[in-house]
Amino acid sequence: MVVEINNLTTDRIDKSFFKKNTGKIVNFLKIKIPEISLVFVNNSRMKNLNRRYRGKNRVTDVLVFDYGRLIGDPLKSQGEIFICLPRAKRQAKLLKHSLKNELVILLIHGILHLAGYSDETKKDYNKMSKKQKALWQKITS
């Protein structure tokens, strides 16, 4: 699996940390995704992406694009995960944990979307949340 990391913010990102954890998450899920692009963005870029692709004119913490599903060929799954770094910092502070922990939680969330999980309904959200917590436990143990 290829993990490409693009940091479009002025903050420093530990690329090897994210590559290692992306591999761990994908292995725990037992899924095959040939390529994942992880992109760190600022508030304005995330708001623009969210407005353009989801019709929601606000900042969100993570957006995921699964190009294999978009073209109707899940065997050519190539995912792109956008994480809003300023939003992650804010959430980490509110939840009283480290930025690193928040970023791993968002990474898990993004990869779960690539694995086919949804959080659009309450039932799906609860199922995804449970899986996210279980993966978090595996990653941090």
Image (cartoon, rainbow, N blue to C red):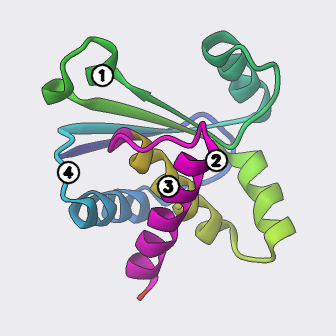
Badge 2 or badge 3: first in the primary sequence: 2
Which of discs 3 and 4 lies nearer the camera? The answer is 3
Q: List the single residue furthest toward the left.
A: 75
Q: Which mark is residue 128?
A: 3
Instruction: Identify the residue position indicated by label 2 in the image.
Output: 122
Is residue 115 found left or right of 130 in the rendered image?
Answer: left
Q: Are marks 1 and 3 in contact (CB under 8 Å)?
A: no
Q: Amino acid at mark 4?
A: Ile
Comparing 51 with 18, the one in front is 51
Whole-angstrom CA distance, mark 3 to mark 4, is 16 Å
Region rendered in magenta: 114-140
Badge 1 or badge 3: first in the primary sequence: 1
Comparing 126 with 22, the one in front is 126
Q: Is residue 131 magenta?
A: yes
Whole-angstrom CA distance, mark 2 to mark 4, is 24 Å
Q: Amino acid at mark 3?
A: Met
Query: Dot 1: within a 10 Å radius of its alpha carbon, few (fewer than 14), some, or many (20 or more) residues?
Result: some
Which of discs 2 and 4 lies nearer the camera? The answer is 2
Which quadrant of the view contains residue 80?
Answer: top left
Q: Amino acid at mark 2?
A: Lys
- In this picture, is 65 found above or below 24? above
Whole-angstrom CA distance, mark 4 to mark 1, is 14 Å
- In this picture, is 124 found above or below 139? above
Badge 3 or badge 4: first in the primary sequence: 4
Badge 2 or badge 4: first in the primary sequence: 4
Which quadrant of the view contains residue 76?
Answer: top left
Q: Which mark is residue 69?
A: 1
Q: Is residue 13 magenta?
A: no
